Image: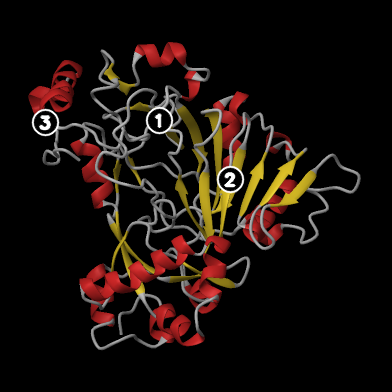
Amino acid sequence: MAKVNSVYTLQPNEATSVGRKKKFVEIANNEYKTVSDSPTHFIPENDTVRTDGVLTVSGEAKEASLYPQWLPTWDPELKFVDEPPFNHVDRGFFGDPEFKRLFPQGGKQEIKKLTPKFGSVVKGVQLSELSNDQKDDLALFVAQRGVVVFRDQDLKDKNLSAVKKFGQHFGPLHIHQTSGAPEGHPEFHITYKRSGRTRSFEKRVSAITWHSDVTYELQPPGTTFFGILEGPQTGGDTVFADTIEAYERLSPTFQNFLSGLRLIHSAKAQAADSLARGSIQRKTFVSENVHPLIRYHPVLGKKSIFARAFGTRIVGLKQEESDLILNFIENHVATALDLQLRASYEPGTVVAWDNRRVLHSAIFDFLPVDSVRHCFRITPIAERPVGSREEYENWSPSNKEKTVEEWEELYKNGVPKSESIAKPNSVN
């Protein structure tokens, strides 16, 4: 960032569409110049403000778009709160382990493994036509393979309400706190990398950012779908890493140590960055949650690494101590190429992944080119992250969630016993 202004809140005389447009023009021209050309934020120097105050991409971008109905809008007047806590029952529990419904004998499907343990490519299966039983098989298949690349999909051509209904089979759909969404459909997360000049590498030598999506939520996503609408002829892939295998490669001693730790996840930086750019924050919710560093997957019965993403500090550790562990984990995932795969996009590609067991990053190797990268994400919410089967069985929406301060109190004399963590409504 060349310059970042303080987080901005509209004043009363600026709450009209005219006042808002004037303020965003000031941000674009005087106070803030984007460096990363964010694909999810409104960018004042590129985008526009309608007469009703809704933020949109430019008229030229709309005219050039192949899928204008999927273009992002940002409405500062729309405010949301989080989905209330709920008992998520993963659809993978109802899947057929032999996948006979999803991949019937004699069917047209073609299935190819991307790596022996991790990732598959599927042709001949149309997601929009799946029955509920087949969707259950799909949830289990995605959990087992981690990442599944589906070719030749027609979700992009369907009515947005129908696409939303498809996603809701796997859980309530997440509404992102800052990103753009098609007008009237806030449940979709849109990434729209604009064409033209880029500043993505002016201040950085790499744009790889390993993460699991919106981990600051109390109940982050599970089975996730990401579809390409428009993109470059080559490049713009997504790289994935298997955090179950990453965990299983650690020594038992280190596994046990990490399994007792909790990580604070914060939404504050993302919200501040969005507002500083002249974009919006449209959700009011608890901005920090504490999740286990090693997460239990209820369908697979396995553990995975759940860091770093939006994690800021490990509970009970000083910042330097926390950074040492988190940097080791990040380096472990980033350098173990045999834990990774690269999902490429063709017209109609939809990639499904399990947000609980993989980390991912966009790859901006197609820059700078005069091409947009326009994609949509369907993001069903899953269970509250837990560190063990015992925690999973003891958690309830009625449990009082510990605050960060209560977690700090629990860890003040070292890592507590597992039964103390699993016991709800208590810090003792």
Q: Quick check: 130 left or right of 4? A: right
Label placed on residue 366: none
Q: Earlier in the sequence, mark 3 or mark 2?
A: 3
Where in the figure is residue 400, as x and y percent of width and height?
A: 34, 68
Question: Residue 152 sits in which quadrant?
Answer: top right
Question: Residue 155 sits in which quadrant?
Answer: top right
Residues under labels 1 and 3: Cα distance?
A: 22 Å
The amino acid beneath tag 3 is Glu
Query: Do the numbered discs 1 and 3 sit on residues whose CB atoms are within 8 Å?
Result: no
Q: Is residue 297 visible?
A: no
Q: Is residue 181 visible?
A: yes
Q: Residues within 10 Å of mark 1 (few under 14, many from 20)?
A: many
Q: Is residue 402 above or below residue 75?
A: below
Label placed on residue 343: 2
Q: Which residue is mark 3?
A: 31
Mark 1 lies on a secondary structure that is: strand
Which numbered disc, 3 or 2, marks the residue closer to the eye? 2
Residue nearest the viewer, comparing 287 with 24: 24
Total labels: the figure holds 3
Where in the figure is residue 254, as x and y percent of width and height?
A: 44, 83
Q: Earlier in the sequence, mark 1 or mark 3?
A: 3
Residue nearest the viewer, comparing 69 with 35: 35
Mark 3 lies on a secondary structure that is: helix
Q: Residue at x 40, y 65 (%)?
A: 331
Label placed on residue 193: 1
The amino acid beneath tag 2 is Ala
